[in-house]
């Protein structure tokens, strides 16, 4: 909708980018225990079919599958709807571009602590992600605000000043 997120002003975003840059440079060939295959880092992929592009943190290209590795600068180790959408869409990008199935993803949460969650990438995650993508495209096409669902994330949202619900959370 043409709204700038001003991510360069947000400390958490900058710290997350630094974490990603560190992992893109260090241990480039390290494959975690229990996995085998070639590690690929920082893939920029595009899908004409979905009208979507994305950057993949890491993947393990195994013989029969691609294992997605997503890194988050957070100690909040919950696989919520936003992360499910991201995993589902990244899996679809990988499958279309690399020609192998993505059956699972590892999400590594690293800020103060280190936690890892494994996510089964099944049809329900893919379908959910496609529904969310369609909803976002409708918002962009119509130019109307998406449905609001205020919660604790409003305080740290970069759009709260222009959102009818989020604006209630602006510190005065």
Image (cartoon, helix red, strand yellow):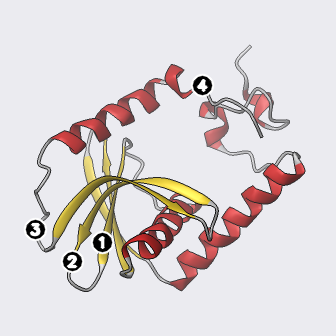
Q: Which residue is mark 4?
A: 6
Going from N to C along the chain, the mark reached first, 4 or 2, is 4
Q: Which mark is residue 33?
A: 3
- Front disc: 4 or 2: 2
| Picture coordinates of residue 56, whole percent (x, y) | 39, 55
> Tag 4's secondary structure?
loop
Residue at 62% across / 71% down in the picture?
49
- Front disc: 3 or 1: 1
* Marks 2 and 3 in Cβ contact (< 8 Å): no
Going from N to C along the chain, the mark reached first, 3 or 4, is 4
In which quadrant of the rendered image does the C terminus lie? top right
> Tag 3's secondary structure?
loop
Residue at 11% across / 56% down in the picture?
29
Asked whether residue 147 is in view, the answer is no
CA gap, disc 3 and disc 4: 38 Å
Q: Residue 165's image quarter?
A: top right
CA gap, disc 4 and disc 2: 38 Å
């Amino acid at each position: 909708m043409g709204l700038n997120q001003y991510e360069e002003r947000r400390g958490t975003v900058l710290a997350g980018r630094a974490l990603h840059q560190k992992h893109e440079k260090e241990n480039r060939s390290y494959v975690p225990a229990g996995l085998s295959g070639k590690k690929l880092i920082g893939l920029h992929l595009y899908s004409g079919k979905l009208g979507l592009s994305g950057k993949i943190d890491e993947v393990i290209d195994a013989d029969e599958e691609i294992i997605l590795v997503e890194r988050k600068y957070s100690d909040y180790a919950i696989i919520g709807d936003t992360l499910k959408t991201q995993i589902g869409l990244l899996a679809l990008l990988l499958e279309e571009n690399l020609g192998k199935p993505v059956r699972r993803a590892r999400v590594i949460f690293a800020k103060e602590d280190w936690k890892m969650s494994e996510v089964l990438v099944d049809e329900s995650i893919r379908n959910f992600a496609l529904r969310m993508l369609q909803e976002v495209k409708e918002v962009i096409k119509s130019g109307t605000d998406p449905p609001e669902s205020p919660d604790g994330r409003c305080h740290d949202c970069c759009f709260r000043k222009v959102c009818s619900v989020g604006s209630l959370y602006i510190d005065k």
